Image (spheres, grey):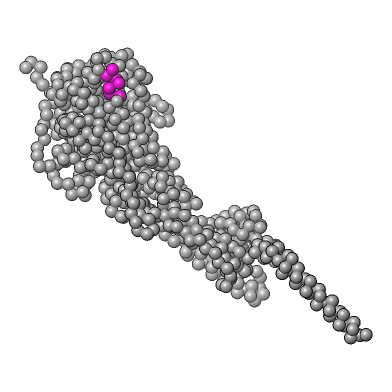
Amino acid sequence: PRLRLISLGLTLVMLAFVVRLLQVQAVDANAYAAKANVNRYIPVTLPAERGSITDRHGVDLATTVDAYDITAAPDLLTPETAKIDDAPRQAAALLAPILGKDQADLERKLTANPKSKYVVLARQQTPQVWNQIKDLKNALDGSAAKGKGVNVLAGVNREAHSKRVYPNGDLAAGVLGFVDAEGHGAAGVERELNKRLAGKDGKRVYAQSGGRQVPTGDVKEQPAVPGSDVELTIDRDIQWAAQSAISEQVTKSRADRGYVIVQDTRTGEILALANAPGFDPNDISDANADALGNAALSDAYEPGSVSKLMSMAAVLEEGAATWNTHVVVPNRLPRADRAFADDIDHPTWYLTLNGVLAKSSNIGTILATEQLGKNQKQADRVLYSYLRKFGIGRYTGLGFPGETRGILAKPEDWSASQQYTIPFGQGLSLNAVQAASVYSTIANGGERVQPSLVRGSRDSSGGFTAAKAPKRTRVVSEKTAKTLAAMLESVVDNEQGTGTKAKIPGYRVAGKTGTSNRVDPKTGRYHGYTASFAGFAPADQPRVTVYCAVQNPTKGSYFGGQVCGPVFKRVMEFSLKTLKVAPSGKRPARLPVSYDPSR
C-alpha cells in the first residue's frame, strides 16, 4: 500500500508537470512569448548619413562627423526590474556631469514613461562622451558581479549618429542655413533640400538581456539610405572675397546690414551670395536672430537709381529716344503734387540720354520715360511691362526659404507721385538677387537667365544628376543691351559719372550707382538710405556681375558710389582674377554726356 501511495503521488506530480507544460507550450504559448518579447527586443533607428554640401569645385561647405545619441530603456530602471527604488535618480546623477545636462531633466526623461524601452537623453555627443559612459557601465558591471550594488546604467546605450559641421565657419552661412537638434534642415539650403540631403533612416531590432545584446539572438535590420551630396554654384574663394568686403564696409559705415551678389552673366549661376552681419552655423546659440536668415533674398527695399537701367532699357527698346537724344534738365520739375529734384541743386543741365544715366538725374529719367506713351497712363503701362520682364515683382526661381518677390503694384494702382518716382527706383521694391539679375540680363545681350544656386546632386553610388537648365527670357534686343552697356561705362569712366570709384585698371567696367530713401522695417516710414552699386565686367565681353547694397549707413558718406563703389571694385577684381578673365582689348566708346545748346 505504501508503494502504491508513493507511485500515485509521483504520477499526480508528473501529471501536473505535463498539464503545465501543455499549457505553457501549447495553450498559452503566444501570450508567454509576447510577455518575454516585451523585455527582450530593442528597436533602434539607424540614421541615414546626411549628404554634404559643396561649392562648385567640390570643396566641403557642410559635412558630417561621427557622433552618438545617448539613449536609455526606462523599463529596465523600474523598481521591479532594477531591484532598487531610486535607479532613475542614480542613473541621472551619474550621467549628468558626463552629458553636461541637468540631473533633474535626465531623471524626468527616465521616469516619464516607465514602460518605455527607448528615450533619447542627449543628441550628437562625441565618441569621447560615449567612451566615458561605457567605462562607467563596465565598472558598475564588475561591482554588480561581486554583489556590490546594481548596474543602473545597464539600459543606457548609444545610437551611431552624425553631427553637422561647417568647416568654413560663417562662410556662406546665409546660403547654407543650419540643422536643428533633430538633424533636420532648419534654414537655407539645408531646409530647402532637406529631403534630398537627409536620405532615409533604417531600423534595427535586436534581442537583449540585462541591457546587453544577446550574441546569438535574432537581429532584424533594414539599412539606412544615405542622403545625396549637393553641389552649389558658389565659388568658395569668391564667396570669401565678397563676404570679407561687405563685412568690412558694414562695420566701417556703422550700417544695419549689407549684401553682395556675384553672378555669372552667361549662365545665371550665383558665384557668391554674401550677407553682413552673418552667423556661425556651428553654434547658433549666440547668433543674432535677425542674422539667421538670408537678408539678400528676404529683404525687400527700394533700389533707387540702379533701377534707372530698366527705365532706360524701356525707352531705347521702344524707340522713344536714343542714347544721344538731348534732354534739358531743369533744377526742379513740377509733377503731380510736388516738385522733383536731383540729388544736388544745379543750373539747367543740357544732357544726352547717356548723360542722364551717367549723372543719375531723376528729372532726366522722368522726362525720358514720359515719352513711352501718348499720355502718362500709357507710359506707366509700358514701363510696368518691362519691369516685369526684368523679374521685378516675381520670385527669382531659386525657391529659397523666406525669399521675397518684392513689391510692384499694377500701373492702374500707382499713385500720382509713384508715376514719377518708380522710373528712378522709388515706389517699388526688390531683393538683392533680383537687382543683380537685372544687370546680368543686359550683360547677357538682353536675355534674362533665371538665377541658380544648385548645380546638381550626387547619390551614394556616385551618380551625378545635374540641375534643371534655367529658364531664359528675351527682355530687350541685343542692340539695346549693347547700347546700355556703353552708357553704363560712362557712369564709371567719365569724370562726370557717379561711379568713378569702381574703375578697374585694364578692364572696361559698366556700372550704376544707387542712393535711395530707405523704409525703416520697424516703423514703416522713410528713415536713412540704401547705398548700392551694380555693374558688370568686362563691359565689351561681359563675364561677371557684382551687386552691392548697404542698408542705413550712419558714418561717413551714404551715397552709393562712395559706399559700394569700392566694394564692387574689390570683389570684381578678385572675381576676374579667380576666373582668369582676360583684360579688355578695346577702349570704351566714351559716349558724350552733355551737349552745347548754342549749337
- Residue 264 included in the magenta stretch of the image: no
- The C terminus - image quarter: top left
- The location of residue 153, given as percent across then percent down, is 60, 65
Tell me the residue at 41%/45% (across/down): 192
60 on left or right of 509: right
546 on left or right of 14: left
- The N terminus - image quarter: bottom right
Which quadrant of the view contains residue 459? bottom left
Q: In this view, does 211 lie above or below 570?
A: below
395 on left or right of 223: left
- Residue 379 included in the magenta stretch of the image: yes
Q: Give the magenta-colored segment's residue range.
A: 378-384
Tell me the residue at 31%/14% (across/down): 336
Query: For this rendering, which residue is in front, 234 or 531?
Result: 234
Q: Is residue 581 above or below residue 47?
A: above
- The location of residue 553, given as percent across then percent down, is 31, 34
Q: In this view, does 571 lie above or below 183?
A: above
Which quadrant of the view contains residue 144? bottom right
Which quadrant of the view contains residue 451? top left
- The location of residue 321, given as percent across then percent down, is 17, 22
Pick out the residue farthest to the left: 599
Query: For this rendering, which residue is in front, 496 or 414?
Result: 414
Q: How many discs appear?
A: 0
Query: For this rendering, which residue is in front, 521 or 17?
Result: 17
Tell me the residue at 25%/17% (across/down): 373
45 on left or right of 116: left
Magenta segment main secondary structure:
helix
> Can see residue 579?
yes
- The location of residue 420, given as percent across then percent down, is 29, 19
